[in-house]
Image (cartoon, grey):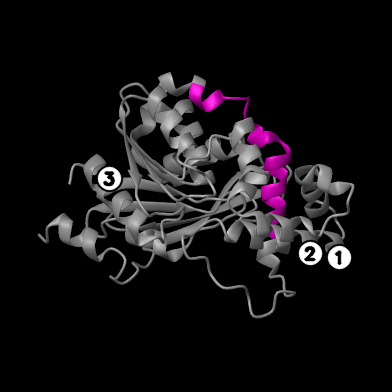
Amino acid sequence: MIPYAYRIDTAFTRPTPRPRASGWLEVGGPHSIWWEETGPVDGLPVVVVHGGPGGFIKPYYRRLLDPARHRGIFFDQRGCGRSRPSAELAENSTWALVEDMEALRAARGIDRWIVLGGSWGSTLALTYAQAHPSRVAGLLLSGVFLARAEDLAWWWSGVRQVFPDVVAARDSLLTAAERADPRAAFLRRVLDPDPAVSGPAAMVLGAAEGQTLDLWPAPPPDDPDALDPQELASARVFAHYDANDYFLTENQLIEQAGRLSGVPGAIVAGRSDMCTPPKGAWDLAQAWPDARLTIVAAAGHRWSDETLGRVVVSELARLSGF
């Protein structure tokens, strides 16, 4: 057996495992969610929860798991990725997604699993774990987003302290009156049924967020006026959740952290994460003493940041008992 430490070092260079099984699961109303499974059937189950809201499974997520010992479960949330119908907002809420996870767990014949979530995926993973702690063998969160008023305030306006130029460019799309409340203005525009209104707002919002995710942001697109339909679908799902305060009450995830008593946990934060700064991770760690907090120097927001991703892989190994 190759030592797991070696696999940590090569997690971001080894080939991406291919799904062993995949399909759609009907979960009620108009929705069917797309799922994929990797690794051995008798492996330790790990469900990976993508970000967003409005994100989707990315192939590199599979490299976070041990291909020989983890049974990886991945799914696109309602309205996201390959789930059907695309960008459907009816019967689409945090609590519907929590029950989708339970339905998927039961459908795949899994009793308990480790839950791994990043960014919005940390929010959903944490909500799920608090609702169904007996089904959680371990909980690993990164890029913690607690959906509190202070977290929303940072995302929409506080980030201006570090990215004044980015926020100014974002808000230049808005009228002078709309700039008094950019959040309300962008949500209204993105949810507008007219693509001539929603499309530019989705592009500008996505471009602004993209500058906050990594220490070295990706260059702007070759054609800044070309909006991929998937980008607009993602933006609509995001706007739906943000407009509804993520279907959570203020400070709910901190106040209900006691439900995680006895659940082994890990919290990973990038010191330089400007999308979800480390304070959310710190606050959660104070309320959940069973979790080990690691703040990673010179790391950003995403698992594709190898400095952050290697710690996520290492903490997953620890929770797995490897």
Residue 304 magenta-highlighted: no
- The residue shown at (35%, 21%) is 261
Q: Which residue is situated farthest in the left direction here?
A: 1
* Residue 87 visible in rendering: no
- Mark nearer the N terminus (1 vs 3): 1
Nearest the eye: 267 or 88 = 267
Could you tell me if the residues under marks 2 and 1 are in contact, i.e. CB atoms within 8 Å? Answer: yes
**Local SS, label 2:** helix
Q: Is residue 259 above or below residue 225?
A: above
- The residue shown at (52%, 38%) is 123
> Which mark, by number, is residue 315?
3
What is the C-alpha distance between the residues marked 1 and 3?
Answer: 45 Å
**Local SS, label 1:** helix
- Mark nearer the N terminus (3 vs 2): 2
What is the C-alpha distance between the residues marked 3 and 2?
Answer: 40 Å
Q: Is residue 208 above or below residue 257?
A: below
**Residue 163 image position (x, y, % from top left):** 61, 55
Nearest the eye: 134 or 139 = 139
Q: What residue range appears in magenta?
A: 233-254
**Which residue is disc 1 drawn over?**
196
> Which mark, by number, is residue 112?
none
Could you tell me if the residues under marks 3 and 2 are in contact, i.e. CB atoms within 8 Å? Answer: no
Residue 247 magenta-highlighted: yes
**Which residue is disc 2 drawn over?**
200
**Local SS, label 3:** helix
